[in-house]
Amino acid sequence: MQPNFKKFMLRTHTCGELRIENLNQKAELCGWVQRIRDKGGMIWIDLRDRYGITQLIFEEGKTSPEILETARTLGREFVIKATGVVVERLSKNDKIETGDIELKVEKIEILNPAKLPPFLIEDDTDGGDELRMKYRYLDLRRNSVRQNLLLRHKVAQQTRIYMDSQNFVEVETPVLIKSTPEGARDFVVPSRMNPGEFYALPQSPQTFKQLLMVSGFDRYYQIVKCFRDEDLRADRQPEFTQIDCEMSFVEQEDVLNMFEGLVRHLFKTVKNIDLQEVPRMTYADAMKYYGSDKPDTRFEMKFVELNHLVQGKGFQVFDDAELVVGINATGCAEYTRKQVDELTEWIKRPQIGAKGLVYIRYNTDGTVKSSVDKFYTEDDLKAIAAAFDAKPGDLILVLSGKADKARKQLNELRLEMGSRLGLRNPFDYKVLWVIDFPLLEFGEEENRWFAMHHPFTSPKPEDIPLLDSDLGNVRANAYDMVINGTEVGGGSVRIFQRPLQKRMFEILGFTDEEAKKQFGFLMDAFEFGAPPHAGLAFGFDRLVSLFGGAESIRDFIAFPKNNSGRDVMIDSPSSISDLQLKELSIDVKI
Amino acid sequence: MQPNFKKFMLRTHTCGELRIENLNQKAELCGWVQRIRDKGGMIWIDLRDRYGITQLIFEEGKTSPEILETARTLGREFVIKATGVVVERLSKNDKIETGDIELKVEKIEILNPAKLPPFLIEDDTDGGDELRMKYRYLDLRRNSVRQNLLLRHKVAQQTRIYMDSQNFVEVETPVLIKSTPEGARDFVVPSRMNPGEFYALPQSPQTFKQLLMVSGFDRYYQIVKCFRDEDLRADRQPEFTQIDCEMSFVEQEDVLNMFEGLVRHLFKTVKNIDLQEVPRMTYADAMKYYGSDKPDTRFEMKFVELNHLVQGKGFQVFDDAELVVGINATGCAEYTRKQVDELTEWIKRPQIGAKGLVYIRYNTDGTVKSSVDKFYTEDDLKAIAAAFDAKPGDLILVLSGKADKARKQLNELRLEMGSRLGLRNPFDYKVLWVIDFPLLEFGEEENRWFAMHHPFTSPKPEDIPLLDSDLGNVRANAYDMVINGTEVGGGSVRIFQRPLQKRMFEILGFTDEEAKKQFGFLMDAFEFGAPPHAGLAFGFDRLVSLFGGAESIRDFIAFPKNNSGRDVMIDSPSSISDLQLKELSIDVKI
């Protein structure tokens, strides 16, 4: 790494580099005009590049008239080169690292003029979403967006450092693969050389990483683009990035330790946070206590089931309910009637769909009041309060109905209350493993079983007998990592023996022929000496956005697509020529 | 990076780990059965994993009968777990790192049996190409192939280490982009959500990296998949990997220095080779002296032009030729008539297409003989020999005809002679920059100008006036890195001003409308403050294969496609369902 890298022909320093130690040195800077202050006799210009901002100064009488004239023609976002001498500032700026100095300009060159940008290149911009997407290359100039991408780079770097240190081999798996009907929709690519045939873009490198284990690669990883042609919810992208990993000769415990290590390493090196040991929660407990397989554990507010306390007291709604379940919104007893009504309306919205909300107010004076006082004595209510460990000043919120629905609704309410109570600080990180997922879930509509993770996930050995008798209760060696209520990663111990894989495909309704056509190569591979293996994948976009304390992944992707899957900057997708269609042996049919 | 990573539940050590220091320790190993030697009273098994081979020993009388029995049921490529005690070997094997010890097995478990593989899992395999591709997961078990992929990983690692050290930011650019008719053919992806419209897969992230420069990222890199739907020559792949880079506020010199630094770093860290300063050659010289823009400089054998020495002597063939040009095959004067005839036939093959070959033999006795003695005196021939600095024992080979053709043919002959003379050792690395490429080349068939690199390459400032008068002589600030006669990287200083980019599109025959439709966003971007910038891309597959001393890139790609663009292992591309076609609003039309 010897050669003279300091030889940047156009500049001697970056805009973030000069310090008081450089006093009286000559310097050449290049960058963008961030701001101009023209006070008549003096002109100051903030010159910006990726590394920082340096103030340029022009002074009538001292700066040559031609240069002053040029300086006065500059506009925001002009690209210039300024040559001058580093001088000490009269009024220093301790908010920027170059704040002690300024460059007394002796020569200036306009490298490229700029039209006025359609929005402000500032942290607080006046540009709307649509406009910023169209001019994404300008949006990326904003400090906040650039910092997001630098953060992304850092997380990728540190991921690789950790994985390398643990002897993982980075192997690139193919992007042009084969379409499989299972799971979400594939993007397909017509093959010109094989008319009528199509490649598919991978939803994940799942089968390839398993084949790499069969090949003996032992430890594989890749930071890799994946693709899903789904309807794009608010925060999905048709192309997204995974940290994809697989290990051989391991059990679940090894995988959990290894990737807890990765996340610990990332928190330490990227955020300087010492992560505690990551707690584990079974799927069953997650559903029971949080109504979600990705509980937000930044705050307690656990579910308490109340059937035994509230049923048989004449309140029909509770008596008829499969489940009566509530949370304790600590300190909310002071909520006004209006506030509680508003909460009730909130939870009755179609998106959540609860029928109603029962509250029990544990007043600060020790009395207990509820919206169902008619049916319950004060003792009844106190017994309920006790079940929540409620204290005077708390507000208990109760939902009821079908168990699944009630839990789902209460999960929403819990999260909402967490937010209202300020318990969901994005920079307060709580990491959790959710384990022991069910292997299968039943699709009522389709009237068949689906793999909860994917068809390659292994049942727990002790639950294998249940495959013949009780599919719904077969647990998988599958695990998710959840951070602050968001699933950031998931994986499983895989099936590695052909007979079990064959059985799994049968359960999922594949005919022998279908299974062979789509995954024959994998089942064949299992017969040539496949090792026990397991792995997981992290959603890289999501992980980075969590590190950035943001909700949306979009600002952590350099060139994201909008909710219709369009890149409005390059105007893609777009039509292609008839000639191109003909060469690809396809026709458009709308 | 604290947790207990040594906790591999299924093994205590890898098969490459145990040494004499581990004597008498208990160990659990997992791996594949590489070889079994059953000498009746003793059985030895070589157990293999990614890290090495450890010998297992079973001894009648000492090993329990049940374990012996199990050992005797094992076959090649069975996956087993063996528990035992490390003992010293009687006859040591200094070819493997574990060769001083063996594991006296006390317990054995078959984790997965294996059918007999269709070819030998050995360095010298008996499997043909087609079979090895179909069972690629078995081919990848072979040491040589695994080493190739480990090498690839190392080159990627070291590339990142260097780029990171030089402040480059890794930014992921999108894979679903927009089709452009310029250049090689795009793969396209129908958009389900935008019926009748298509994404395209990038042939390179060219426009995006330029936009990142406009965004002020200053230094960008990415190790990235690119796609080209071309007819696949012997050593092309429809998907391939680039090290893609771009820098702002630099000139050509900076780029050459920076990436010479990268290559130097890679040679040092991966191959432990100290690379000398990389010489530079203009495109004009490369063509004149080597007949190629990617000369193999492992050996001299430069072209010498002979028109002034050979024309006007009555030899019609030379007199009519635009160019008479030859090379000196040093030390080949002893070539028999048969050998020279065979060379002549070789060069007359349709792939090369020369009309004939003239030779001048500088005999060891000092006499000079040629195939055209009729027309040239011995003095004439000696003058020619002198032009080559030929010495007794040399053989001069001369071609003639249209200049372009003769050069191309002589380039082939030169490379062939280099190979025959053993001058092209794949581990003797000669790195070269070829610079000053022409900006444009004329397509005779299409009767128009094409960009030699791509439409974003900047002409040399001093040649800009020629854009109006002499397109063929406009030189570009474009450069290729050539290693051992192979182009491994190329790039250019880019156009960064709208008017020049517009002019360039005009020259290339774009209408205003076409230019706007396809690259409007880039030309717009140039108006909002684009910095001067330049970059380059390395062919990563090619670079790695050169480091591996191999000619083909295929064995450095985990899952390559064959010459028809097929993955024969997963049988892709393949047909998709009518339902899928309907959802994508396309029809197959063969």
Image: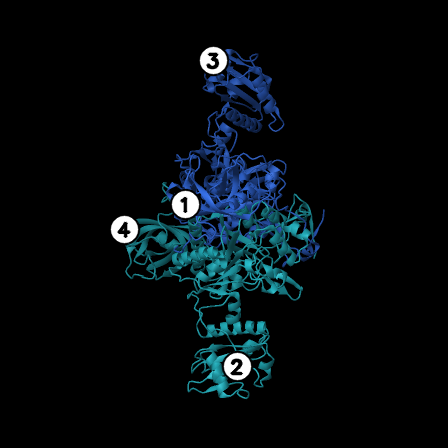
Chain colours: A blue, B cyan
Left or right: residue A243 compared with residue A353: left
> x%, y% of residue B42?
33, 59
| 1 or 3: tag closer to the N-terminus | 1
Left or right: residue B446 compared with residue B492: right
Separation (CA) of disc 4 from disc 3: 71 Å
The residue singled out by tag 1 in the image is A162
Chain under callout 2: B
Q: Which mark is on residue B24? A: 4
Say which element carries label 3.
loop
Say which element carries label 1.
helix
- Asked if B176 appears above or below A317 in the picture, the reply is below
Chain under callout 4: B
How would you rate the neighbour count of disc 3 (Cα within 10 Å): few for under 14, some for 14-19, many for 20 or more? some
Separation (CA) of disc 1 from disc 2: 66 Å
Separation (CA) of disc 2 from disc 3: 113 Å
What residue occupies the far front of the structure in this picture?
A61
Separation (CA) of disc 1 from disc 4: 33 Å
Disc 4 to disc 3: CB gap under 8 Å: no
Q: Given the image, on which type of amino acid does mark 3 rest?
A: Thr
The residue singled out by tag 3 in the image is A364
Picture residue at 55% right of the left edge, 12% below the top: A373
Say which element carries label 2.
helix
